[in-house]
Amino acid sequence: MEIEVISDTNLGKVINAIRPVKYNNVSYRFCVSGDALRLANKHKESIPHYLQAIMKDRNNIDAYVGIARSYKAIENFEKALHYFKQANLIEPEFSLYLEIGMCDFALARYEEALKDFMSAIRLSPDNLDAQTWLALTHEELEEYSMAFLIYDNMIEKHPEYLNAYINKGTLEMSIDQYKEATSTFSQVIKINPDFYKAYFGIALCFDKLGMFKDAKRYYTKFINLKPQAEVADFVRARIFKLSKIKRPGCSHLSLVN
């Protein structure tokens, strides 16, 4: 049976019904009201409720996590990091290390983020989200060989995980390995022929390589799959320009930045 939530009060009742009481009643009630506000996207309004919950019970891990997520939602990553760490001191767990790592990443503290994501992976070695964040952090540190190693390992063990291919291909493009990137994106299409982002990636690579006929073909496939994409205007304009080329490799055409 689907529950229709029509107010913050009703949302609080739903949360109260499914969350077991682990803390003193006052702290628990403040935490539930904070949850209700946060889940209604009233993140700033939820913060005082979580603070009250913490003041009433310093071991209320749900309140620390709730306030951290509210701060993260309003992009106050410093405070989000502080409260995620407080929660992790009470009860270390995979999801908290992952959240701490994402906050450090957002704050460009990449060395710290590496440690956080490694801690998360030690608790959940097969988690693909943690592995992806670890690879992205290596990218930010320009440790590309490590990032490629992680992506290749994910692809070998989880060939159905498309994000590994997309991230690998995007990294290849960023370091001007366009030929390699076309191969990586082509693997995505073999797995899922409707994955439009792969067509866009291949089109950009062919464009950079001066293979304009192939670029036009893949831009067209992309726009047919995703006509309302954010880059749709760019793609249509590019197809129009490429249509004007009379011979492949025409040197006067400027490529995509």
Image (spheres, rainbow, N blue to C red):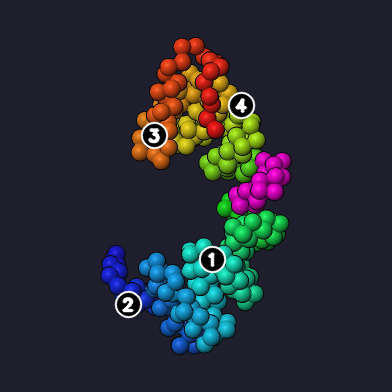
**Quadrant of residue 100 in the image?**
bottom right
Disc 2 to disc 1, C-alpha distance: 27 Å
The amino acid on which the numbered mark 4 sits, given as a three-letter code, is Lys
Q: Is residue 170 above or below residue 118?
A: above
Residue at horizontal 53 percent and vertical 15 percent from the top: 250
Disc 3 to disc 2, C-alpha distance: 44 Å
Residue 29 visible? The answer is yes
Disc 3 to disc 4, C-alpha distance: 25 Å
The circle drawn on residue 76 is 1
What residue is shown with label 2? Answer: 9
Lower sequence index among marks 3 and 4: 4
Residue at horizontal 52 percent and vertical 33 percent from the top: 201
140 magenta-colored: yes
Secondary structure at numbered mark 1:
loop
Q: How crowded is mark 3: few (under 14 residues within 10 Å), some or many (20 or more)?
A: few
What residue is shown with label 4? Answer: 179
Lower sequence index among marks 3 and 2: 2
User: Which residues fall within the magenta stretch?
Assistant: 132-150
- Residue 95, position in %: x, y? 57, 63
Disc 1 to disc 4, C-alpha distance: 40 Å
Dominant secondary structure of the residues highlighted in magenta in the image = helix
**Quadrant of residue 163 in the image?**
top right
Lower sequence index among marks 2 and 1: 2
